[in-house]
Image (cartoon, rainbow, N blue to C red):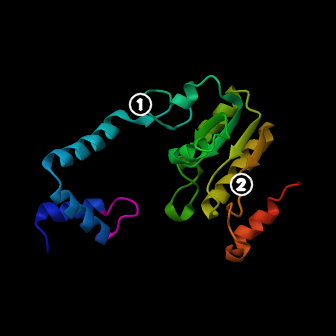
Amino acid sequence: MYYAAPVAILIDELTKLPGIGPKSAQRLAFYLLKISPENAKDLADAIMNVKDKIGFCNVCFNITEGDMCELCCDFDRDDSLICVVEEPRDIIAIEKTSSFKGRYHVLGGAISPIDGIGPDDLKIRELLDRLKDEKVKEIVIATNPNIEGEATAMYLAKLVKPLGVKVTRIASGLPVGGDLEYADEVTLGKALEGRREM
């Protein structure tokens, strides 16, 4: 109503992006109106390039340009250890720590009945298939420490433990440099549960 139809359509499309509300979409649309046609084309080409060339790894479901991602092709990684994450971006966060040298498995989300996401909507069956085919001794469940992530972790643990594979969960609690007085009860409780001997 307030904008020319192409601008209104652009704003509407931008509001479909995660974390972008109507005001942010409006700002982005007007920014895009100001940039040069070449820059706008570069952005459009980058989006189409990702859509055309990026898919999911046939093994772990990480993003990749080929059939298998670089991590699955890396023979120096520990095949006996699989870290289970919700999304490909979680792999990047873990890899930045340089603390994990095993394999990964991306579920593609977390169990969330409110959002209509059940176990069959995730890559759980594929994980169980990997546990049969590979010599996996441990899976590390690194789902988010929220209700959905915890529910997914508990569900996976119930499925995997009977297979004789060790199931561990990443610790959660206080961030390094944090103050106890500012921690919420749940975070502090998790920190106490995850305490270790010194």
| Secondary structure beneath label 2 | helix
Q: Which residues are magenta?
A: 15-22
Please name the residue shown 40% across and 60% down the image. Answer: 18
Residue 35 location (% of width, % of height): 18, 54
- Secondary structure predominantly adopted by residues drawn in magenta: loop
Q: In which quadrant will I find the N terminus?
A: bottom left
- How far apart in space, not on screen, are marks 2 and 1 (Cα)? 32 Å
Q: Which residue ends up furthest to the top in the rendered image?
A: 75
Tell me which corner region of the image, top left, top right, bottom left or bottom right, holds residue 127: top right
Residue 2 location (% of width, % of height): 14, 74
Q: Which residue ends up furthest to the left in the rendered image?
A: 4
Quick check: 156 left or right of 41?
Answer: right
Q: Is residue 107 visible?
A: no
Image depth: mark 2 or mark 1 in front: 1
| Residue 8 drawn in magenta | no
Please name the residue shown 13% across and 48% down the image. Answer: 37
Circle 2: residue type: Met
Q: Which mark is residue 126?
A: none
Residue 197 location (% of width, % of height): 89, 54
**According to the image, label 1 marks what residue?**
65
Q: Is residue 155 visible?
A: yes
Please name the residue shown 61% across and 45% down the image. Answer: 94
Quick check: 46 left or right of 89?
Answer: left
Is residue 83 depicted above or below 132 in this figure? below
